[in-house]
Image: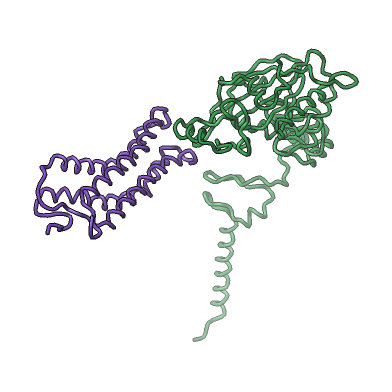
Chain colours: A green, B purple
């Protein structure tokens, strides 16, 4: 069979028409259909989202508004960040360069800076700051504030006799009083102590210790045990524990030296807070406080916080009132030199 | 007391004495502890002690009481093996000491007194089973024998 040439040309033109029609149909979007990706990529203007479709994320490189509006938003963002930082207790400077430098310094979890000593670090009154080994340089300058202040109501309160403090050449200072207290406490076996700043002075807190029923410290390692233990085994103690199940008694002493009167807060004292007092705090009395003169208005009070706990209790119970007077407790603990006769 | 055998009545009396005396200290300790409020729930402590010693004490008392009321009968007395009596005696003594020890080590335990007593059942339970079995040979079996005059623990009636 021989095909005629006019037939071939007619077929070619028909194919060309069909191809043209298909091409037109592809380039023009049909109503209700999504635009072709290639066409969308090629188009410089963003395609408006259709109904029922999520809006595409804005491109970061695209300018959203005029340059002046963008600058205002950035400034507002920076101000918001600064306000947040201030609320957390972080030092924020207004100058961007200083802020950048401060951001480069390491911070501990409480917002205090390591390596940058500054005043009133941790003295915000918002809690124990600079705890657990952070901010040691800051502590050397200023002790963290005793929290809470005024202190919780103690089990017993004893006035300390400061007449035996030997003053320095220039007059009595807080350092002299600290030396007097420290010498007495060291002689009585209180090696672990923590210092805090309080309004008008300082506070010295001893570690949580286990004491006997008469207020004398338990002998040996049992003294620093946080669970009730026999100091040295005796039949009497054993029978008491077996037949009476008497709880172990624990105690924390906070020596407050200040020239300002203070009351106690109704906030309840807890064993956790007592332990935190002893573990946190400055390792020594800051030099800035030690050098301050301690006039006649300065007085000292020992606040004794007692707890009772059975060996199977999860938490110790704070004793609002004790059987043994505070002065007797101090005398039996080797601190008779502090107590007024 | 010949041929390695003891009269049954003698064995019963010795075991009864051991159990009465052995039950006294733990009972006294628990009484004082209850009076002093050692246990927040004292009934839990008594629920521990009473099943520990009361069943055996009850059995001993019952058998002794039945023997006391029984009319004296002629004929040879029942006997028991000396070795078995000694085993029972020392098992009972060890068990009663364990009960006393359990109460006594409470001050050294980190658990609460009631929880500690409850956990001691794991040791005391099997021990009590062994002791009760051996005691039953002397007391429960003899009670049955008493009701049938032709029998005894061992046929020592020649």
Q: Where is residue B30 in the image (x, y as percent from the top left)?
A: 38, 34
Name the quadrant of the N terminus of chain B.
bottom left
Q: Can residue A84 be seen in this view?
A: no
Please, is residue A322 above or below residue A24 in the view? above
Q: Is residue A101 visible?
A: yes
- Residue positioned 70% across, 30% down in the render: A188
Residue in the foreground of this view, choosing between A267 and A165? A165
Q: Position of residue A331 (x, y in %)?
A: 67, 23
Q: Position of residue B158 (x, y in %)?
A: 12, 59
- Residue positioned 36% across, 31% down in the render: B31
- Residue A253: name its quadrant: top right
Q: Position of residue A337 (x, y in %)?
A: 73, 22
Residue in the foreground of this view, choosing between A186 and A94? A186
Please, is residue B145 above or below residue A256 in the view? below
* Residue at the extreme right: A169
User: What is the number of callouts on the image?
Assistant: 0
- Residue A260: name its quadrant: top right
* Residue at the extreme bottom: A1
- Residue A215: name its quadrant: top right
- Residue positioned 20% across, 42% down in the render: B64
Q: Is residue A323 left or right of residue B116?
A: right
Q: In this view, does A330 lie to the left or right of A31?
A: right
Residue in the foreground of this view, choosing between B12 and A134? B12
């Amino acid at each position: 069979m021989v095909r005629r040439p006019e037939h071939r040309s007619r077929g070619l033109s028909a194919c060309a028409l069909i191809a043209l029609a298909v091409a037109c149909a592809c380039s023009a979007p049909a109503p209700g259909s999504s635009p072709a990706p290639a066409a969308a990529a090629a188009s410089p203007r963003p395609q408006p989202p259709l109904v029922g479709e999520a809006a595409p994320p804005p491109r970061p490189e695209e300018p959203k508004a005029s340059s002046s509006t963008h600058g205002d938003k950035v400034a507002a963002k920076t101000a918001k960040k600064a306000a947040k930082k201030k609320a957390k207790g972080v030092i924020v400077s207004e100058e961007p360069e200083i802020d950048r430098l401060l951001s480069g310094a390491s911070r501990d979890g409480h917002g205090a800076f390591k390596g940058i000593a500054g005043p009133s670090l941790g003295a915000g009154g918002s809690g124990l700051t600079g705890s657990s080994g952070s901010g040691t340089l800051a502590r050397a300058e200023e002790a963290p504030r005793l929290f809470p202040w005024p202190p919780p109501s103690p089990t017993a309160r004893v006035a300390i006799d400061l007449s035996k403090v030997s003053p320095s050449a220039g007059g009595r200072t807080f350092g002299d009083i600290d030396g007097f207290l420290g010498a007495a406490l060291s002689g009585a076996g209180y090696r672990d102590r923590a210092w805090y700043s309080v309004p008008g002075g300082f506070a010295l807190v001893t570690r949580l210790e286990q004491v006997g029923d008469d207020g004398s410290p338990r002998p040996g390692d049992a003294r620093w045990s946080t669970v009730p233990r026999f100091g040295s085994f005796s039949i009497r103690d054993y029978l008491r524990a077996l037949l009476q199940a008497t709880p172990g008694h624990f105690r924390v002493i906070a020596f407050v030296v200040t020239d300002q009167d203070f009351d106690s807060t109704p906030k309840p004292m807890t064993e956790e807070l007592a332990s935190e007092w002893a573990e946190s705090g400055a390792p020594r009395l800051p030099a800035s406080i030690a050098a301050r003169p301690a006039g006649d208005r300065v007085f000292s009070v020992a606040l004794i916080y007692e707890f009772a706990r059975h060996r199977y209790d999860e938490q110790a119970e704070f004793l609002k009132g004790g059987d043994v007077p505070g002065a007797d407790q101090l005398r039996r603990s080797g601190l008779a030199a502090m107590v007024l006769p | 007391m010949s041929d390695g055998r003891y009269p049954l009545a003698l064995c019963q009396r010795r075991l009864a004495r051991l159990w009465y005396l052995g039950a006294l200290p733990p009972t006294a300790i628990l009484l004082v502890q209850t009076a002093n409020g050692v246990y927040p729930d004292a009934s839990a402590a008594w629920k521990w002690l009473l099943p520990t010693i009361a069943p055996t004490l009850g059995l001993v008392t019952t058998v002794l009481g039945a023997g006391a009321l029984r009319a004296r009968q002629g004929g040879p007395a029942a006997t028991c093996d000396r070795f078995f009596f000694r085993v029972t005696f020392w098992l009972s003594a060890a068990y009663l000491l364990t009960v006393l020890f359990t109460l006594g080590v409470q001050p050294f335990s980190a658990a609460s007194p009631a929880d500690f007593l409850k956990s001691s059942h794991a040791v005391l339970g099997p021990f009590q089973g062994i002791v009760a079995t051996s005691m039953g040979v002397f007391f429960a079996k003899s009670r049955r024998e008493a009701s049938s005059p032709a029998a005894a623990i061992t046929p020592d009636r020649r």
